[in-house]
Amino acid sequence: MSDNLILQISGVSKSFGPIHALKSVDFDLRKGEIHALAGENGAGKSTLMNIIDGILQPDSGEILLDGTAVKITSPTRAQQLGIGFVHQEIALCPDISVAENIFMSATNVSKSLFMDFKALHKKAADVLGQLCDIDPAVKVRDLSISSQQLVEIAKALTLDCRVLILDEPTAALTEKEAQILFGIMRKLADRGISIIYISHRMVEIFDNCDRVTVFRDGQNITTRNVAEIGPGDVVNAMVGRVLGTLYPEKQAEGDRSDDVLLKVKNLSDGSRFHDVSFQLERGCILGIAGLIGSGRSEIVKGICRLEGAVTGEVWLNGQQLATQDYQQSIDAGVVYLSEDRKGDGVFLDMPITVNISALKVEQVASKLGVINRDKEEGQATALAKKLNLKYGRLSDPVSSLSGGNQQKVAIAKMLSVNPKLIFLDEPTRGVDVGAKVEIHKILRDLAQSGVGIVVISSELPELIGLCDRVMVVREGRISGEVSGADITEENVMRLASVTDAAIA
């Protein structure tokens, strides 16, 4: 084995019942390199990383660290060997402070009877200072998703690791936060720390990584130097076919309707957003852009009556809505798909059927209020077919599905109530390229069928490629709107980040 290799995976296989998650996989990691791992959800990436981290044990194969065969029996053993793992799904303790979360491992092995909180907060502040400005004393539950992700990364940086695994670390980060992370990754690599970087975003792979390995169907399809391969080659290797455009054809200018489906007038909550007015025409996909913290999600939650009281008017199909809570919004045909799939989008441990019917269970209940399982399964079967859901059995838990298919279940839950208007917050976060294509087509088909579609996204390419119009939110107000050829990254970022004086 080359002296330059720190980690070598040889012939590793792993099955879950009849499903072969990994099939005699080989993979290697050089000292001081950033090695991208790409592949569709369900390709085997997470399974291999969980084996490297000791969460799972392989059925066969060998792991070598610095040329020596090792058996990684647990995440604790992985840390002892110098392996750190930042998972895509946030796994912090919400009811304790940021500092306590960051140094939880050190605290667990400490023999001290008392906690020196002052020293702990100072150490946490030093680590966080590399990434962001977060108060180490604040409880994790009071942080935004993006801030929680930064705490996860800070926690990994405190480990004395030689191998660092980052699984979709920028999924919840702003562009500025992501760029800071990329700078830290390069500094770590320069110090000889090796990084496995899992991402669905081609631009991140090609801007920051040295090599890229593509997994498909539990197998290593190719490993290449980034300088020797293009994004299209990686995508085609991921899906096993030449993939067409990521986005369906937009609404033709001549087909645009004057029929206003949604009209919002002077919507305010008194603190997070103010005097918000906009409208959505039938057949149009409206995008909402803005930096994290701008108030874009809060505006949508206000329309749906998910958080607190609001003032202003909301009109749907020419009728003013007088909804007071989310259940009334659902009854009116207005639904919201959360950005937090794990926390609010689906019930991971419950069956697919139950998830799909959860928004309005009375639709599949008898007159006595008892769930009719045949009716529930019929509803799930029809929506699964419509969304091309890939599953084993409808009675399987949603956790058994890939990320893309979990998101389809969340969308199916929205569609189960025959909505007139759907707000989708980060609809393709953590979803692979192939599933993104399918979800984008689903949204366009829904818009063409007359359902109102409003998309909030941190991915500017998604807003540019998918939406007919993009509304930009800054500091709780609408700072402007772009459409057609004017939907560019430069125009959106200008509206999202500059001052009113600069715009004028």
Image (cartoon, helix red, strand yellow):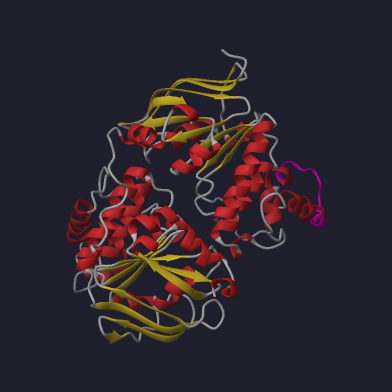
Which x, y percent locates residue 489?
A: 46, 57
Q: Which residues are magenta?
A: 108-118
* Residue visible at 55% across and 40% down in the picture: 166
* Residue visible at 63% across and 37% down in the picture: 186
Which x, y percent locates residue 255?
A: 20, 67
Q: Is residue 455 above or below residue 85?
A: below
Residue 117 painted magenta: yes
**Count of numbered circles on the image:** 0
Q: Is residue 167 above or below residue 97?
A: above
Which x, y percent locates residue 107?
A: 73, 46
Q: Main secondary structure of the magenta part?
A: loop
Q: Is residue 53 above or below residue 279?
A: above
Name the residue furthest front: 504
| Depth check, front residue: 392 or 214 | 214
* Residue visible at 76% across and 50% down in the picture: 126
Along the horizontal axis of the image, is 6 left or right of 398? Answer: right
Task: Give residue 30's quadrant in the image.
Answer: top right
Quarter of the figure that contains the N terminus: top right
Task: Give residue 278's quadrant in the image.
Answer: bottom left
Using the rendered image of the protein, determine whether residue 447 is visible from the camera's viewpoint.
yes
Q: Is residue 61 above or below residue 373?
A: above
| Depth check, front residue: 469 or 382 | 469
| Depth check, front residue: 257 or 484 | 484
Which x, y percent locates residue 382?
A: 18, 56
Residue 473 painted magenta: no
Quarter of the figure that contains the C terminus: bottom right
* Residue visible at 70% across and 35% down in the picture: 160
